Image (cartoon, helix red, strand yellow):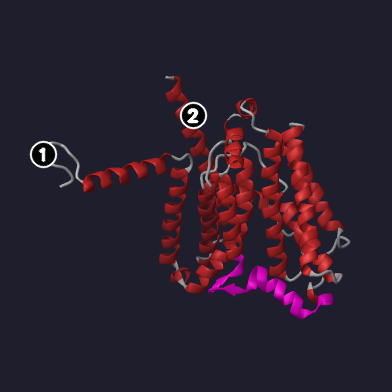
Amino acid sequence: MTGDKRGVFTPAGRCEMNNRKGIKRILAIRGMGAAITAFAGLIVIYVAFGILNPKVFSGQNILNLLRSMSKYLLIGIGQSYVMITGNIDLSIGSVVGMSAMLTATLMTLGVPPLVAMLISLCCGLMIGVINGFLVGKFRLPPFIATLGTMFVARGIGYMVNGNRNTDNIGIKLGKEVGDRFQDFFYYGKTAGIYNTFWIALVIFIALFFLLSKTRTGRHIYAIGSNVDAARLSGVDVVATTIKTYLVSAFCSVVVGFILCAQAGMGNMEAGNTYEMYAVAAGVIGGVSPLGGSGLLLGTFAGAAVWQTLENGLNMVGAQVGIQRIVIGVIVVFAVLADAVLRTGNGLKKSK
């Protein structure tokens, strides 16, 4: 019994009511429903592929999944920050490639890894600042602004090593230094899990806190909901927009380090189409491309769904074309669902 005959609730009854209220508050958070749906879909997809091929459940495959999804998670975080403001960043893939090529080229010239990474980070963040100024200050359409910087960043990636892939990163620094770099970002493990995942998880936690618990995060959502109202309420739209593009550039640069470590060299085509993977990770997780809503928890789920689909389809022998079609349909469905929900809400309000 949770209450007596007079309708007075016992402590057990009050606890139950508080739990219900807590659950309702959590579900009321914009984007939480989509995030939960994405996690539920992830479980269904993973179990389905596991039934088709039990190797999907193997420990090594799970470790590989976590490592591979980390790249999509990082670029998905960057794109999610930008999309919540109602913008988009098409330069992500090119910044990834520029970072990988610049880091690898410097290391093949004998520059210590930490210095090479700092130079690459500065160059990547400069692209982010330019994107933020073009979109926030000069109000260029984000598609056009970031399309331009996409070509610029990719061009820099081509030029730094004379339009060719680099040699092995340890050619001048020595195999030991090259191996340490590769182990830190890709091949090494900590507590039995690849370092790549730990790097992505630390960045995820930091940026999750920034988006959900700080004034900057509130301003990001405000701009995405109504940029004019945000400006009138005192939000510095230009500075906040630049911050979102800086986050996107930072995440892209880190993925560049990961790809450089994975290959042990710089590949001019590294990061190709990653901007689309980033959009997919966010959208599948419920981040609205129309701005104003979405959670990084959903992006985490979206990146996991994307990688699980890719991994599972590979393990059941599906052709690459089939993989792309399946993932493309899911992305379109996710965006369509968001548009329908927004239209439905609008209709209810108008009535």
Amino acid type indicated by mark 2: Thr
Residue 215 locus on image (x, y percent): 59, 40
Name the residue rendered at 84%, 63% in the picture: 164
Q: Which residue is mark 1?
A: 5
Q: Are marks 1 and 2 in contact (CB under 8 Å)?
A: no
Residue 147 appears in the rendering: no
Residue 181 locus on image (x, y percent): 71, 71
Amino acid type indicated by mark 1: Lys
Q: CA distance from mark 1 to mark 2?
A: 46 Å
Identify which residue, 301 or 269, lies in the foreground.
Answer: 301
Query: For residue 114, which quarter of the picture?
Result: bottom right
Is residue 9 found left or right of 214 in the rendered image?
left
Secondary structure state at the residue bearing disc 1: loop
Badge 2: residue crowd in 10 Å (few <14, some 14–19, many ≥20): few
Name above or below for residue 179 compared with residue 30: below
Q: Which residue is mark 2?
A: 343
Identify which residue, 211 or 52, lies in the foreground.
Answer: 211
Badge 1: residue crowd in 10 Å (few <14, some 14–19, many ≥20): few
Range of residues picked out in magenta: 171-196
Name above or below for residue 74 compared with residue 266: above
Q: Marks 1 and 2: which is nearer the front? A: 1
Name above or below for residue 69 compared with residue 242: below
